Amino acid sequence: PLLDYYGAQSKLFTMPGVGHVLTIFNQLCAELDARKHDIQSVMHETRRFAPSEAFVVAAAVDAERLQALHRHAAEDHVGFWAAQARTHLTWQRMFDHALDDSRAPHYQWFSGGLINASYNCLDRHLDTRGEQVAITFETDDAQVIRYTYAELHRQVCQLGNALRSLGIGKGDRVVLYLPMGPQAVIAMQACARIGAVHSAVFGGFSADSLKDRIEDAGARLVITADAAPRGGKRVDLKGAVDKALSNGGCASVERVLVYQRMDGCPMHPQRDLRWQDLVPSQPTHCEPEWVDAGHPLFLLYTSGSTGKPKGVQHSTGGYLLGATVTMQWVFDLKPGDVFWCTADVGWITGHSYVAYGPLANGIEQVMFEGVPTYPDGERFWRMIAAHKVSIFYTAPTAIRALMRLGDELPARHDLSSLRLLGTVGEPINPEAWLWYHRVIGGGRCPIVDTWWQTETGAMMIAPVPGAMPIKPGSCTRPLPGICIDIVDEDGVPVTQIGRGGLLVVTKPWPSMLSTIWGNDARYAETYFGRFGNSVYVAGDGAQRDEDGDVWILGRIDDVLNVSGHRLGTMEVESALAAHPRVAEAAVVGRPHDIKGEAILAFVVVRGEREHAIASGLQRELCGWVAEQLGAIARPDEVRLVDGLPKTRSGKIMRRLLRSIGAGQHLTQDTSTLENPAILDQLRG
Ligand code: WTA
């Protein structure tokens, strides 16, 4: 049976570029061999898990309703979305056209409509649930601070007024370099309130990365904090801002607003202002700026296959609709739910399912400042019990890390408040899925495996948990109004079950990116350059199984997924190449038990290789990359080599490097290598 299992699964991995999944699979096989008693459960990978009857009976969206939604969308794609937008958003002026495709691939959703995202997230709840908790915030050292909708509204209005007093208004870009916490949500909402465009930069990015993003966005204001406590350590933030702005960098920035979270920081007298000095004295009424539905709500920089991150631009109306309705469908939201999404606000998940979606739906959510393993590996479970979390949404990498610590830690806590679990960011291996289901969900909670991207704005392929069975490792079906296909290199739909292809979206959807900031051509080329203006190419490989369920096979471009974070191999390569002792570098992902993928860099040094090895250049280069790009980009290993494997036409053989990194038996033809002797060096 084991061989049958291997054989059945191997067809999953027939596409080039699906090394990531292949390696997860290899790990799985190794684990299977080592732990025979688990074989039974893992072999049930194709087993379906139906929701319990209790879940179905109470479901916000049951099978019948889901079918009705799908039918409506299939009959009238645009009309379906128009109906959703009328029902779930509050408009100052109703839109005239649900979809204007005259400038495709720049699709305009809900044109003629006037809206404000902050009004939709806050004001419209005040009459009915002003005193209900909006955010329960737990700090690194376990202090709990609650914000009701009324309180959050007040603080957003005050910050909105403060920003206006600094001359910030509609269309101005504001970069947020803030720790995970309510102030980040307040800052995003305040920008939205006055029509300013926020661009959050994850606190783990370096000063240089921050500088690139500020400059590309042309931001007039940066909002940051002095520092943030994280896992018992002090993470400096303002220092990085100072560095980014030093030596005439970021010339567009006029002011820096500093939220004092810890013990303070040096302030630049003409430029820097303290949040606590400016904001609390502001009036608590702040008239929302009503903007066109297409007005940019935010930019979020993400990695692509080139060396430069791109500013993904999202609209106000369409984006907010996506974040709002997908939460209702996938998270089965009901009054009384306590939702906890563990993503940092610096990533898209923290935008759609922390800063906007939960608030637009008027529910209570938990926010957490720290890390899952501080002060110990029970932190998440203790928090779920303490705050009676009912819906928990996290990344497979966190599940894998916590699974390692054993079943005893979660067993010490009452997790009975949970009724639904979710994952996002990377494929989840069946082992981790089954553990999450059994140990965290007590076998009773459906798991929604949600596929989406920074660019898609909201979940795209995911189960509607009360309406269908689920299987470990599959994100199941596209949501209503989302049209996807899997095509071959020529754009022809793949019909053969179990054959991989490129995942594409064949009709525009409201929460799709509007463009890449300042670069319409790159937008058109990157996403629509391959099969024409109506086919969005996601950059992932996927396949369907016998039931029509979708399995994501991972990125097909040079984008890495390290702990669920997107990183371009080219970004890491250019950071390495900027080091004076580096002549050339190639970077690949290699399988990692917890991170999913880890960074392995092959570097050709200037001068003597032996000397460089003796002087510990490898370690220096790891630190160098972390400094250049941020700690999340730190390579796991740097191998110094005399040359990189190249084809006769001079292209780096990345696939060969990936195989070497994964320690696989090489199937590639290496006879074209200019210098076969370097194979040994590459193997490390
Ligand atoms: C990957 C995160 C498998 C995928 C929301 C995608 C996933 C990239 C899943 C986007 C999933 C996301 N299963 N892979 N459920 N969700 N991915 O922009 O490769 O940070 O293209 O958005 O993550 O990453 P991003």
Image (spheres, rainbow, N blue to C red):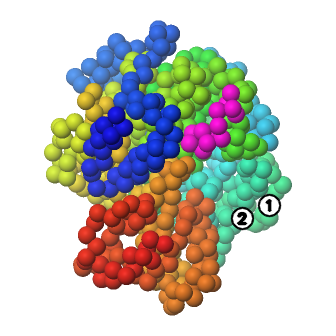
The tag on residue 2 is none
- The quadrant of the picture occupied by the N terminus is top left
Mark 2–mark 1 CB contact (< 8 Å): yes
Tell me the amino acid under the disc marked 2.
Gly
Distance CA(mark 2)–CA(mark 1): 8 Å
Quadrant in the picture for residue 504: top left
The front one of 301 and 630 is 630
Toward the right, the furthest residue is: 263
Tell me the amino acid under the disc marked 1.
Cys
Residue occupied by mark 1: 265
Vertical placement of residue 566 versus 130, above or below: below
Under tag 1, what secondary structure? loop
Image coordinates of residue 225 in percent, x first then y, are 72, 53
Q: Looking at the image, which residue is at 30% across and 83% down? A: 674
Q: First in sequence, mark 2 or 1: give its number.
A: 2
Residue occupied by mark 2: 239
The front one of 453 and 377 is 377
Quadrant in the picture for residue 203: bottom right
Image coordinates of residue 404 in percent, x first then y, are 61, 42
Q: Is residue 508 visible?
A: no
**Where does the magenta region start and end?**
399-411
Task: Report whether 395 appears left or right of 113.
Answer: right
Vertical placement of residue 597 versus 382, above or below: below
Q: Looking at the image, which residue is at 61% across and 73% down? A: 619
The front one of 161 and 260 is 260
| Magenta highlight on residue 305 | no
Q: Looking at the image, which residue is at 50% across and 10% down? A: 54
